[in-house]
Amino acid sequence: MTANETHGPQLPASEDFTLARARAHLRLYTRTRPPTERLAPIETAPLFRAQGAEGRSLLTDLAGRRELGLYVCGLPGVGKSTLMLHLILDDIEMGRACCVLDPHGDLIRAILDRLPDDETTLCRVTLFDPVDTDWPIGLNLLDARTERARDLAVQFMLELYEELFLPDHQGPMLHQSLRNGMRLLMELGGILPELPMLFSNHKFLAYRLMLSRDPWVRNYFEKVWQQVTGPGRGDYLAYFTSKLSCFVDDHLLRNIVGQTQGLDLSAALEGGGVILANLARGVIGDLNSRLLGLILLHKLERLALERAAIAPGERRPVHVYVDEFHEFATEGLGRFLAAARKFNVGLVLAHQRLETLAPRLREAVLGAVGHAIFFRQGGSNGFGALPPLVWPRFGERDLLSLPSYHAVSRVIGADGMPRLGRLTVPRPMVGGTGAGDHVRLLTRVQMARPRGDVEREILDRLGWTIPTEKGDTP
C-alpha cells in the first residue's frame, strides 16, 4: 500500500483497541501531515475562488470578524447547508476550533465524507452520535465547576421546562424544588437520573444530605420539603417526578446524561478540536434531538462565559454552527448571542423561515448578529423584517427571486460599517474519503463507554439491582 492510499477493508473492533493502537491503525491508512507544512489560506478555498471581486471582499471581511455572529436564512435546497459545509471545512483545514449541531444528520455526513485524510486532522475531530447506542458518550449537565456555572445550569433547566411544559403548569414550588435538587447533586458530583430520586426516595435523599455542606440546600430539604405532607403529597410527587421522566425513561437519553464523565466541550474546543454533533431527529426522535441540542448549546454558553478568566488576546476563536437552529431556540439563545462576541465565540445560525421564531427571540437574533446572508425567501409572516437589513441595495423582489446557490449579504467590515453584496456558493466537492470511519473509531476509544458498563453504573448510583433469573448464581 502506498502512502497516498487510504483505508483498509475493515476497521478493528473498538472494544479490542487502546488509544495507542487506534492511532497506530490510523497511521497505516491515512497521510501524516509534516509539522512544517503550511495550511492553505482562505484565498485557495473553493468558496473564495467561486466569487467575483465583490464576493471575495465580503468573505475577507466576514473571516476577519466571525465573532460578530452570522445569520443564514433561506428556503430548502437553496444552498444554506452547502455554505455552512464550505465554512466548516475551511475551519477544519485551517486548524480552528469549531462545533456543529445538526438536527437532520445530512450536514454531519457531508463533513465526514470530505474530511482531510490525514492523522493530524482526524485526531482533532470528535463525533457525538447518539445513534451509536452501544457506545454512548456522556454529556453531564451537572458537571458545573463554579458557582456561576451552577447558577447557569439551574437557569437553563427552568427555561427548558418553560419550553417543554405549559408555563401555567409550573410555579414557585416546582422551581424551588428543581433549584435545590440540582444544587445538591452538583455539589456531590451527581447525574440527572438521580434528580427524581431525591423527591421520591427518603433514604436516597437522607444519605446525600449527610454529605452536603450547603446549609441552604439542607434547610430546604429538611424544613421546607418535609412540610409537603398530607393526602395531596402523592399527587404532587407524581406531578413533579413526571416532569423529570424525559431524562430517565428513554434509555438513549438516560445513558448519555447519566454519565459523570464524557464529552468535555471546554477541553476539546480550547485545544483547537472539532465536535460534530449528529442529532438526527428522524433516528433518535424529536424530543431527544431537541433536548440534547439544548444541553449542548447551554454548555457552549457556559464555555463562552468561562473565557472571562482568559486574557482577551489569548482567546482562540471558536466557531459554533447550528443548522435549523429554531429547533434548539430558547430565550437563553439570545443571552448566548449577546455574550459570545465578547469572548471570541462566533455563532452561525441557519434556518428556513424567520417566522418560525417567537417574536421576542426573532428580535434578539436580528439585533445581536453582525453578519447576515439571505438565500431565496418565501413571502410569509415575518419576512418583512429581512429587506430592511439589506436596503437600499436589495429589496423584497431580490430576496424572492434569487437563484439557488446565490445569496445577498450584509457583512460588517473592519471599520465597523455594514457592506452589502452578492455571494455565489459553489456545489460541494465530491466526497468519499471514508475518514468518518476513523473518526468514529477514535471517538469510541477516547470518549465512549460500552452500554452495559454505563447502565450498571447508573443502577449502582440509584441503589438498584437487576433481578436474577431463576437458577442464576448470585
Image: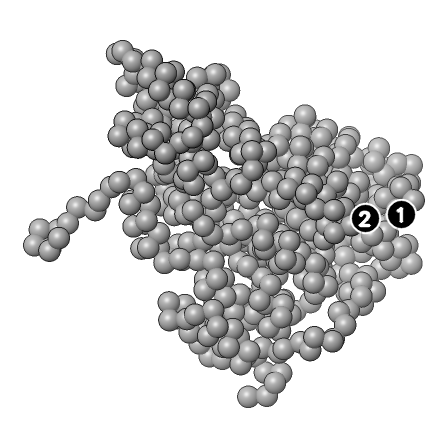
Indicate the secondary structure of the residue bearing disc 1: loop
282 or 305, nearer to the observer: 305
Q: Amino acid at mark 1?
A: Ala
Q: How far apart are the two marked residues, 2 and 1, measured between alpha carbons?
A: 7 Å
Give above or below for 43 relative to 207.
below
Residue at image x 32%, y 22%? 237
Give x and y (percent) for residue 30.
Answer: 58, 77
In the picture of the structure, the residue carrying the numbered disc 1 is 414
Sequence-first disc among 2 and 1: 2
Mark 2 residue crowding within 10 angstroms, few (<14) / some (14–19) / many (20+): many
Quadrant position of residue 401:
top right
Q: Which residue is mark 2?
A: 65
Q: Residue at x 29, y 50 (%)?
A: 456
Asked whether, in this view, residue 331 is left or right of residue 438, the answer is: right
- Left or right, 32 with respect to 464, comes to right
| Secondary structure state at the residue bearing disc 2 | loop
Amino acid type, mark 2: Arg
> Residue 123's x, y, as percent?
57, 67
Q: Is residue 6 left or right of residue 13?
A: right
Q: Is residue 285 visible?
A: no
Q: Nearer the viewer, residue 384 or 116?
A: 116
Pick the residue in front: 400 or 124.
124
Residue 454 placed where, x, y %? 35, 52
- Asked which quadrant contains residue 13, the reply is bottom left
Q: Residue furthest top?
A: 230
Q: Residue at x 78, y 65 (%)?
A: 45
CB contact under 8 Å: marks 2 and 1? yes
